[in-house]
Image: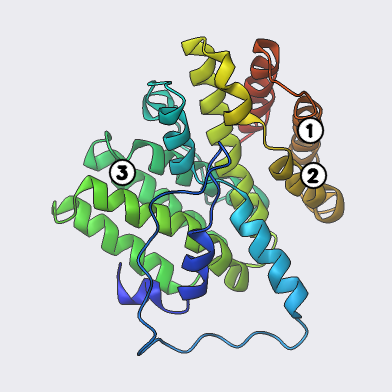
Amino acid sequence: MSQKWTRGMFLSLALASGLVACTGETPTEQPPKQPPAEQPAKAPVPADVDKATLAAQAENIALVPSPAEMQKALDRAGITADLAAKVPDRKLKMDVPNKDQVAVRTGVILADLLLTVKSAEKAKLSSHLAEIKTGMGELGAGSDIAATIDDLDGQIQNDSISRDDLVKELDQLSGAVIPEIEYEAGERSVPLIQAGSWLEGANLVAGAIIESGKYDNATDLLKQPAVVGYFQSYVKTEGQDKAPSEVISQLETTLNTLADVCTHEKLSEEDVQTIHTSTAAVLDLL
C-alpha cells in the first residue's frame, strides 16, 4: 500500500483487522503489523474527545463485517454462489447535493468492488474505483485517499498487482477508510458508508441463500442483532432531522424489520425472504 495511504492510518488498520465474520468467527488472515519505527505523526485528537468516546467509535468500526468476510462466511457455509455474479450492473451518481446519499452510495460501491475484484474486468474495477474516488471527494476526504485510489487503479491497469493482493489491499482500504474519513468528512459519513456496504452485502447473501435453498445456514450468516442495533441507534439519535425523509423513513422501517427478525432463535425461509426484500427497499431508493 502506498506511503500516502499509510499516513495516519496505523490505528485504523489495527481496528479493521478486528472485523468479525458473519459466523461470529474472527478472520484467520490478519494484515502484518506495521513496524514501530519511522511512523508518521498522527493527527492530534481534539481535546474534547475523551477516551470513552474513542473506545465506543472503535467498537462500532469493528462491529460491521466487511463484504470480504461475508464472502468467506458464505464459502464456509457451503454456499458456492459467487456474490460477484449477483452484483447489479448499477451506476450510482455521486455528484448529488445530498451528502447522506453520497455516503450510502459510496458504501454500496465499496461492497460491489470487493465482491467482484476476483472476476471483474479491469475496466469494471476501474469504474468502481472512479465512483468511490468521486464519492470520497464529494464527502470532503483528503487528497491522500484519492492518490491511493489512483495508485491502485494504475497497478490494476498495468497488471502489476495480483488479484489476491488486490483483495487484501481493497479489504484494508474498506476498513481503514471508514475511521479515517470521520476526521476529514465528518462523523455522519461513517455509519452511512458502513450501512451502504452492510446492506448491499446482506442483500446479496440473502439472495444467495434463497437461490441455494440452504436455509439451515441463514442464522449464522444473517442474524446480526448488534449490527442492526448500531444502525438503529444512529437513525434514532442522529439522522431524524438531517437525512432525506424518504430514505431515512425506509431505512428505519428496514432496520425495525431486521431487528424483529433477529429476535428469532433460528431464521426461517420466510425470514430470509424478509431480509432480502427489506434491504432491497433501501437500495432501490439510491
Three-letter residue code for mark 3: Leu
**Distance in Å between CA atoms under marks 2 and 3:** 32 Å
**C-beta proximity under 8 Å, tags 1 and 2:** yes
Q: Which residue is mark 1?
A: 259
Q: Is residue 74 left or right of residue 235?
A: left
The residue located at (82%, 56%) in the rendering is: 238
Residue 171: x %, y % from top left: 41, 52
Residue 133 visible here: no
Q: Residue 145 appears at what percent x and percent y?
A: 42, 67
Looking at the picture, which amino acid does disc 2 mark?
Gln
Q: Residue at (46%, 74%) from the top-left corner?
A: 10
Identified at 19% across, 49% down, the residue is 162
* Up/down of 224 relative to 41, above or below: above
Q: Is residue 286 left or right of residue 263?
A: left
Disc nearest the viewer among 3 and 1: 1
Q: How is the image coloured?
A: rainbow
Q: State the mark number for residue 125.
A: 3
For the residue labelled by badge 3, is the local secondary structure a helix, a strand or a loop? helix
The residue at which mark 2 appears reads as 232
Taking depth in this image into account, of 177 and 164 the one nearest to the observer is 164
From the viewer's perspective, is the residue at label 2 or at label 3 nearer?
2
Residue count near mark 2 (Cα–Cα under 10 Å), binned few <14, some 14–19, many ≥20: many
As measured in the structure, the alpha-carbon distance from the residue carrying label 3 to the one carrying label 1 is 34 Å
Q: CA distance from mark 1 to mark 2?
A: 9 Å
Label 1: element kind: helix
Residue 187: give x, y in percent of width and height.
68, 65
User: Along the polypeptide, which appears first: circle 3 or circle 1?
Assistant: 3
Pick the quarter of the image with the C terminus: top right
Residue 275 vs residue 246: left or right?
left
Check disc 1: other Cα within 10 Å, few if <14, some if 14-19, many if 20+: some
Residue 135, x across and y down, in percent:
50, 54
